[in-house]
Amino acid sequence: MFALVAFPAVRAYSAPTVAATKFEISFPASLHEGAITGRVFVIISRTDNPEPRLRAGWWGDSPPIFGVDVSGLRPGQAATIDASTLGYPPRNLRNIPAGDYYAQAVMNVYTRFHRSDGHVIWAHMDHWEGQWFARSPGNLYSGVIPVHLDPQAGYDIKLSLAKVIPPVPLPPDTAWVKRIKIQSRLLSHFWGQPIYIGATVLLPKGYADHPQAHYPVVYLQGHFTLRAPFHFQTPGSGDGQDYDSRGAAFSDAWNSARFPRMIVVTFQHPTPYYDDSYAVNSENDGPYGDALMKELIPAVEAQFRVIRRPYGRLLTGGSTGGWESLALQLYHPAFFGGLWCFYPDPIDFRNYDLVNIYTDDNAFYVPGRHWMAPERYILREANGQPEVSVREFSRLEAVLGSHGRSTQQLNAWEAVYAPVGADGYPQPLWNKLTGEIDHQVADSMRRRGYDLRAYLSENWPRIGPELLGKLHFYVGDMDNYYLNLAVYRMQAFLEKTSDPYYEGSFEYGRPMKGHGWSPMSDAQLLRVMAEYVTRHAPAGSNPAAWNY
């Protein structure tokens, strides 16, 4: 006999409903009448002081930030950031634990550029703030509001971009500090929009009282700033925002008796991709190198009494400024008389931080392992503790801007070094979400001369004789961005040079000296540079005229 077995009725399975988690961001017509193309951000923080936007995008400790492009967004129309929107450090809104937070929205407004190379792109026009979306004049932002977020229960939070960032106030000139701001003919032609470059000039004590004296000029390279060189503080200004101990010590030395009298100049040359052009020509940024050499430096030399001969033109800078001061010296070896290069951005692309862009296939992990794939890092503490991986930092840039428009470090390098893509934006060296390296882009970067160690090696017979004794490098042995590794490679090359031998120097901070290390104060550096100028002054010159 067969037993009859009763089976329970089969019920149709339905997946549990997932609650929506989203922010809706809009702006009123009273604040901006027309449509906006740009990128909208929502920043979420556990504190409202400082405002969430003012900490967003920091490498090591950014509050959660989420970004989405908008095209032609009209007043009253909402942009949506939801669970599908990429974020950093949490990958999406659902990764934010339930709790009480503060939220703020920002609109980074883009400008349409009709470039002379035929490409039409959208990017953020710098307004003399140094490409910081949270402080850029004309950008919109909301108030900071308390919110309760619960990814299980869901939420739909509306934020109104009801405020606009005001223009940046320009510091006034003083007897010590002068400023130049000019529209670049070369860059305006390339970008199809007015593009401005500038300089901040620090004059020596007694400049007005010695009208016949001409002074060595130090071109101090670095990120965009409107502050005076070396954070100099005008005597009696009472300008508290510029006060710091380093600047105060330098100012005391600058005004002291028998200090070498020199002129120090910083450049302002932000691009639509970054706060700084790296002082060279590039396919994506345009002819910034020509603009500095043919427009800005001539304007400085015409307005101020600098020594207009190579021995009196000196270069220095650190980090980004280290790379660009070295590039200026190598690309114009007979124009500049000497270089003091501190902790430069990668000057050998076999150490693009830790990545070898020519042989590694992926930027995110160490190659050649059978069973493990250790992460590559881009930031560490000086004791060796890793802080931010290349994978994480690449995702941060993907959140801050598509098409290379993050205005952060990796995209900035690509804007300078990489070729233009078919869409008019920089070709990425690696995919910011997978880490896969495009070796055609890497090879193009080297062919264009941006791998400075390779450029120097390939051109040493031609430019070496103009560089004797001019190259001086300084970096900590535990640079936080691993920049010491490429400097080691540069030294290995230069120490083997012959016909001629380079006759320069390298100095390393040990032990555990990180990014920003220097063996001397700013005032001591200028004394070293002044002594160098005096030693190399040609017959007939009069160093005593500026050593009063």
Image (spheres, rainbow, N blue to C red):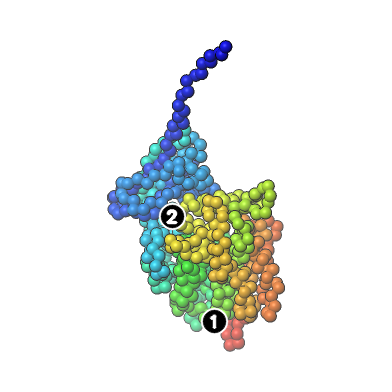
Choose the circle earlier in sequence order: 1 or 2.
Answer: 2
In the image, residue 440 sits, relative to residue 387, either above or below, namely: below
Residue position for label 2? 133
In the image, taking residue 259 as reference, residue 75 lies left or right, namely left
Amino acid at circle 1: Arg
Residue drawn at 49 percent across, 46 percent down: 87
In the image, residue 42 sits, relative to residue 280, either above or below, namely: above
Query: Is there CB contact under 8 Å for labels 1 and 2?
Result: no
Residue drawn at 33 percent across, 48 percent down: 27
Q: Is residue 73 visible?
A: yes
| Alpha carbons under labels 1 and 2: distance apart | 40 Å
- Per the image, label 2 sits on a secondary structure element best described as loop
Residue position for label 1? 309
Amino acid at circle 2: Phe
- The residue carrying pointer 2 sits among few (fewer than 14), some (14 to 19) or many (20 or more) residues within 10 Å by Cα, namely many
- Per the image, label 1 sits on a secondary structure element best described as loop
List the single residue furthest toward the bottom. 540
